[in-house]
Image (cartoon, rainbow, N blue to C red):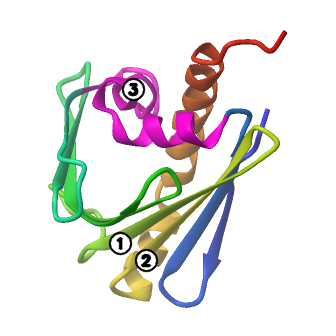
Amino acid sequence: MNKLKVEARGDREIVMTRAFDAPRHLVFDAFTKPDLLRQWMLGPPGWSMPVCEIDFRVGGRYRYVWAHRDGAEMGTGGIYKEIVVPERIVATERFDQSWYPGEGLGTIVLTEHAGKTMLMQTLLYESSEARDMVLRSPMESGITMSYDQLEHLLASRQVPSA
């Protein structure tokens, strides 16, 4: 299985990379279509995504709310700053219950080679303090779980070659 690589870059960035055994357009769809996002962006067991709203255009907003079976909720949202179909998405990120100060800016870049897609996700924070708080959080394990679920979803959406 493909592994998530997470590294700090500079004072305020986190860069994550992961390969997916799927064409770029399928990976792009999985990040931009609510019915697909709800199937993989869940994190640890016990969570669901009852709210997944996407106005996918530059200046459009997105809103995600996760709910745990114990009643806990976590919400985030932001604004799309740049969209290049099917290779690049740039959007802001701000959590309802802020667990790091300020707002983040996320950039997803997808490159395809021989039917496989490399995802590079860069998260830029307002301060090194905010970036370091995220690095100390369980973010990496949650994203790893979600990306593993995405890998399974992508495999189910492909037609085997003859």
Left-right relation of 152 to 70: right
Whole-Å distance between the Cαs marked 2 and 1? 5 Å
Around disc 1, counting alpha carbons within 10 Å, would you say few (fewer than 14), some (14 to 19), or many (20 or more)?
A: some
**Amino acid type, mark 1:** Leu
Which segment did they paint magenta? 23-49
Q: Nearer the viewer, mark 3 or mark 1?
A: 3
Instruction: Say which mark, if any, is on residue 117.
Output: none
* Mark 3 or 1, nearer chain start: 3
Quarter placement of the N terminus: top right
Around disc 2, counting alpha carbons within 10 Å, would you say few (fewer than 14), some (14 to 19), or many (20 or more)?
A: many
Disc 2 secondary structure class: strand
Residue 131 magenta-drawn? Answer: no
- Residue 67 location (% of width, % of height): 23, 29
Instruction: Say which mark, if any, is on residue 105.
Output: 1
Query: Tags 2 and 1 in contact by the CB under 8 Å rule?
Result: yes
Left-right relation of 145 to 111: left
Q: Nearer the viewer, residue 81 or 4?
A: 81
Q: Count the labels in the image.
A: 3
Which residue does the numbered mark 3 point to in the structure image?
A: 36
Q: Quadrant of residue 20?
A: top right
**Amino acid type, mark 3:** Leu
Instruction: Say which mark, if any, is on residue 124.
Output: 2
Q: Nearer the viewer, residue 57 or 123?
A: 57
Whole-Å distance between the Cαs marked 2 and 3? 25 Å
**Amino acid type, mark 2:** Leu
Q: Residue at x 56, y 27 (%)?
A: 149
Quarter placement of the C terminus: top right
